[in-house]
Amino acid sequence: MKKFILFSLALSALISCREDKKIPVCELHPDQCREVSEPKDYFLFGVGSYWVYEEENSGMIDSVYVTESYTGPDCYGFDVVMHSDYDSYDYHFWSILAAGGCPSCGLIEMDRHCVIIKKSKGKPGDFVSESYCFFTYAGVGDWMYSYGLQYNYNNVLKVDNIYPTILVGVKDFESVIKMSEEHTASEEAQPTFHYYSKGIGLVRKELLDSNQIWNLINYHIEN
C-alpha cells in the first residue's frame, strides 16, 4: 500500500509538471498566428521615404516625407515622424504593447490585440491630437476603442476590409488593410477610412464629412 501511495504521488507530480509546460499555441498551430513585428510593415519607413497624394475632387497635392525614424531592440518597437507639406503638421507614429502579457518578439495568436499603433498630430505651439490608428487584429470586423485625448466620447477603430490587391488611382497595391474610425482625432473628429498597404504605408484616405479622397500617386521608400 505504501508503494502504491508513493507511485500515485510521483505520477501526480509528473502530470502537474507536464501541464505547467504546455506547448505554446503558436508552436502547435503557426498558421493561426502572426509575427509581433507585422505592423512595422505598414508604418516603419526610413528617412528619405516620401509619398505624394492627390485629392480626387479638387486636384490638391500633398507631399509627405519621413523626418525621423527609429526601431528599437524589441521586435515590435518603432518611432516614425512624417511631415505634411499640405497642412504643415508633423505626424508621429509609434508602437506599444497592449495589456495582457503580449510578447515583444516572436509569434502571437491572430485574435490577440498585442501591438497597437499610436498617432499624434502637431507642430510647434499647436498640438492637435493623439489616438490609436492601427492594431493587430483577428480579421475583418475586429475593432477596439481609440480615444482622442481632446474628445469626450468613444471612438471605434475597426478593420473594415482586407484586400489582397486594390486599385488606387491607376496603381495596384497589395496586402491592403482598410481601417475605419467613427471620430478620427487627427481629422477634426470626422469619420474616416484609411487604407494601408504592406511595405508602402498609407495609399488612400477618405474624409467623409469634408468629402475629400486622397490617393497616393507617387512614392519612394527607404528602409
Image (cartoon, rainbow, N blue to C red):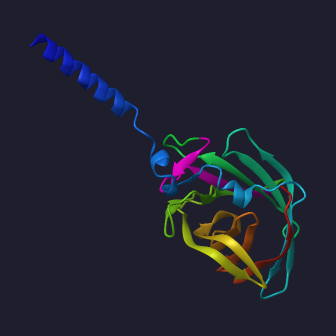
Q: Residue furthest right?
A: 48
Residue 164: horizontal and vertical position, in percent? 63, 74
Camera-side residue of 38 and 89 = 38
The answer to which quarter of the image holds residue 181 is bottom right
Let me know if residue 10 appears in the view.
yes
Say whether residue 19 is left or right of residue 141. left
Quarter occupied by the N terminus: top left
Q: Tell me if residue 147 comes above or below residue 76 in the rendering.
A: below
Q: Nearer the viewer, residue 123 or 75?
A: 75
Query: In the figure, is residue 41 to the left or right of 82?
Result: left
Residue 81 is drawn in which quadrant? bottom right
Farthest-out residue, bottom: 57
What residue is at 20 percent from the left and 18 percent from the top? 7
Is residue 111 on the magenta stretch? yes
Residue found at the far left of this picture: 1
Please give the name of the residue rendered at 74% of the width and 41% of the height, measured from the top-left corner: 72
In the rendering, at what x and y percent does residue 38 appear? 64, 55
Q: Is residue 12 above or below residue 108?
A: above
Residue 67 x %, y %: 87, 54
Q: Is 102 displayed left or right of 93 in the figure?
A: left
Q: Is residue 128 visible?
A: no
Q: Residue 182 location in percent, x, y?
A: 56, 70
Q: Which residue shows up at 15% across the image and 13% down it?
A: 3
Q: Quadrant of residue 18?
A: top left
Residue extent of the magenta highlight = 104-122
Residue plotted at (24% across, 24% down): 11
Numbered-mark total: 0
